[in-house]
Image (cartoon, helix red, strand yellow):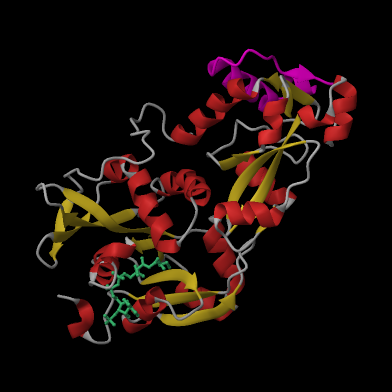
Amino acid sequence: MTSAAHPRAVEVARLLHEAGAPGEVRVLPAEVRTAAAAAAELGVPVGAIANSLVFVAVGQPVLVLTSGAHRVDEAKVAELLGVPEVRRAPAEFVREVTGQPIGGVAPVGHPEPIGTLVDVELARHEQVWAAAGHPATVFPSHLRGAAPAHRRRTRRGRGRPGRPRSGRRTPSPRRRGGGRHVTNTRPGTRIAELPIPWFRDHMHEALAIYGLAMGYDSAVVAGRYGYAIQHTDRPGFRAVGAFAATDDDAEQLVGFGYGYEIAPGQWWHDQVRAALDRRTAKRWMPGAFEVCELHVHPDAQSRGLGRQLLHALVADLPHPVALLSTPDADTKAFRLYHADGFVDLARGYHFPGDPRPFAILGAELPLHPQDPAAANT
Ligand SMILES: CC(C)(COP(=O)(O)OP(=O)(O)OC[C@H]1O[C@@H](n2cnc3c(N)ncnc32)[C@H](O)[C@@H]1OP(=O)(O)O)[C@@H](O)C(=O)NCCC(=O)NCCS
């Protein structure tokens, strides 16, 4: 098969066309795996080659679109993202998150949206060239022409066709309707199970809380969107939310949690399987429910909402156990989980691409807080 007909290049060409980008995908006589080789082949300055480089920041992919004349300063990228460090992603990871091989990564056409930083140097060139999904394909673009194609993918991702999405980066928090009432909390707050379509439509709102609670930068939060939307399709998915009343008789999402049943082939499952010894894995992993995310807006923390969300999330589940991973440090999360029945399955574990040690915790279901009086009921 020639690269002209390569399905990845065809898909990139289709996306560019759909976005109204004027340039055509061009097939080169041979694969060009460096910016210098591409520049020589095209007869353009090396600075006009846009390298699409994938990095890992706290376990999440980040795409850096950089001029071929520049090297990426990883410390600067980490600073921009507000994370401790970023590293170049290994080839397998690049393939997984972009669907494309190193050397052929395009700024568009990925299975899920990836948060992207763009080197301003590229704007100095009237026309820039980027790979089109295969190392022997390139396409020309005026930077302003290329951006909408990617932004569009970033907003919409590749979820189920025809499903309406909010498409708003910061949806209005003043909105009623987040699901079935689950528990009474202090006056003006409630915990509810969230219908999946509602949660998908409000994912940006939930992830804004995730970013604030975890102290992550907006690029990391944006990179999480596609994964979180994908998670809602997993078997056994359940989401819960905490709502606080606002002055004008509306309410605002101030916390959320979600999880699903783990299964081989899921990234987290396979990491945890490798982290646990055989016996522990056999005892804890089959049919387990993963508490994937649990976050309370910093302004609403330490008022009992996190505990109520956790208990609502795992209440009446058919699963024998709940599992989760959390940074291995003296945090509110760690204290909450330990206080409410989670035990250590592994400590000091390093997930790929994240410098922080993690603890992997498990609890038998139903969850019994050690001190029921502490359960804010
Ligand atoms: C972890 C988190 C969800 C807990 O929610 P919360 O609403 O703040 O917690 P609660 O008020 O329900 O308190 C539950 C327990 O958390 C711990 N905790 C809460 N506030 C605390 C504080 N200020 N100092 C120390 N521990 C605290 C305590 O163990 C507390 O139990 P206690 O009241 O019986 O002592 C929330 O703090 C958060 O979003 N943290 C940042 C994001 C995060 O780490 N998420 C988990 C990722 S795995």
Residue extending farthest to the front is: 124
Q: Give the image quarter of residue 291.
A: bottom left
Number of numbered tags placed on the structure image: 0
Q: Where is residue 103 in the image (x, y as percent from the top left)?
A: 78, 37
Q: Does the magenta stretch include residue 328?
A: no
| Left or right: 228 as drawn, with respect to 117 | left
Q: In this view, does 159 lie above or below 136?
A: below
Residue 266 is situated, as x and y percent measured from the top left of the image, at: 53, 55
Question: Residue 288 vs residue 30: left or right?
Answer: left
Name the one closer to the observer, 214 or 8. Answer: 214
Residue closest to the eye, 338 or 39: 39
220 shown above or below 128:
below
Q: Which residue is drawn at 83% across and 30% down?
A: 46
For residue 5, above or below residue 202: above
Magenta residues, start to end: 1-29
Answer whether residue 157 is visible to the viewer in this image.
no
Q: Quadrant of the C terminus?
A: bottom left
Left or right: 350 with respect to 231? right
Residue at left offset 42%, top offset 44%? 229
Residue 266 or residue 212, whichever sits in front: 212
Q: In which quarter of the image is residue 105?
A: top right
**Residue 368 shows in this picture:** yes
Residue 4 among those drawn in magenta: yes
Q: Which quadrant of the render holds ligand 1?
A: bottom left
Pinpoint residue 86: horizontal percent, then vertical percent. 65, 57
Point 25% across, 45% down: residue: 173
Locate residue 27, reporting x and y percent. 79, 19
Q: Which residue is drawn at 73% across and 47% down?
A: 72
